[in-house]
Amino acid sequence: MSLFDTLFTLEAVFVLSGLALAAIAALSFVDRANPSRFGTGAFWLLLAITFALGSVLPSWATGALVLAMVALDGFGLVRHGDYGEPTHAERAASATRLGNRILLPVLTIPVLTYGASLALAPLELDPNRVVYASLGYASIVAAVVALLVTRSRPRVLLDEGRRLADAVGAIVILPQLLAALGAVFRAAGVGDVIAKGVAAIVPTDSLFLVVVVCCTGIAAFTFILGNSFATFPLMMAGVGVPMLVVPFGADPALVGLMVLTAASCGTLCTPMAANFNIVPAALFEMRSPYGVIRFQAPFAAAMLVAHILMLWAFIAFGR
């Protein structure tokens, strides 16, 4: 295996992420301003281990680490500390000095990720490997660009990274937990259970009612799991294919697309979709952690109704 094959992998990015989390843990351990520095440091250190060594640890060990992290947060041992933040006046002066140049690190990530995808296309590598590995390394380059643009010391990068990590808190592990839960649901045959339940309650010869169940069902499951890609196979296997595609002759691509986007109506309303709804509220220090959800909920309801009517009309009048 060449050096490129070793380094340009998602596993390598996970290891680098683990090292970054380990640095955050080390700073947390020595932060005497944090009333729970050992609990906070232990949380980030355990998460660092799952990232860096997840591929070699037995599954039971990873599960034990996750339970330990849940316990640390459940007992209120993950808290904020001191990050050496500049004053408001210093931040305002820095913003005036930098102007639009502060956007350069942000733009670096998509430009390098897209550029790498184009440059490596002739190698016919796994597209997921290219995108995710490029995204990881582009983030490192963006961090260096940020230091150059702001003329800051590397320690500032670590302090700000720790501040953001602590602001997000334990919900940073929620996407991984929900993805695992979706896999458990699929393995447990939840899709078959849904199909039997819908068939027992809803007249399967009623196109409109089946569409309502399919769209509202995937929105509801996405609300619970916080991940539309975990719920999509469940609803398509349980309702979409056997109750829409087969009996009504609906286009599978059409049904799949509409059902997948209907799931986003649940995403907009759930705290389980932490990356979308809870993290922004934490980072912007909003008064309510659910402020983003409250704003989005009316739009989500309108979009769900629109999806139901559109999918029904496409199938009913498109045959």
Image: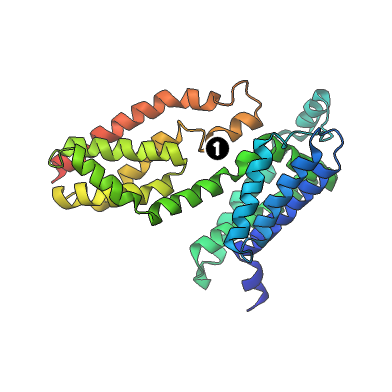
- Camera-nearest residue between 41 and 153: 41
Picture coordinates of residue 209 (x, y %)?
Answer: 20, 35
- Camera-nearest residue between 234 and 123: 234
Q: Provide the residue designation for mark 1.
A: 274
Q: Quadrant of the N terminus?
A: bottom right
- Camera-nearest residue between 318 and 222: 222
Q: Residue at x 84, y 45 (%)?
A: 155
**130 shown above or below 258:** below
- Camera-nearest residue between 285 and 28: 28
Picture coordinates of residue 262 (x, y %)?
Answer: 35, 38
Is residue 242 visible in the rendered structure shown here? yes
Picture coordinates of residue 283 (x, y %)?
Answer: 65, 32
Q: Is residue 158 found left or right of 58 in the rendered image?
A: right
Residue 275: name its quadrant: top right
Q: Looking at the image, what colour scheme do you see?
A: rainbow
**121 shown above or below 317:** below
Picture coordinates of residue 110 (x, y %)?
Answer: 59, 50
Q: Badge 1: few (under 14), some or many (20 or more) residues near its Cα, within 10 Å?
A: many
The mark total stands at 1
Q: Residue at x 55, y 23 (%)?
A: 291
Q: Residue at x 30, y 29 (%)?
A: 305
Residue positioned most to the bottom: 1
Is residue 112 visible in the rendered structure shown here? no
Q: Residue at x 51, y 69 (%)?
A: 125
**2 shown above or below 316:** below
Helix, strand or loop under label 1: helix
Residue type indicated by callout 1: Ala
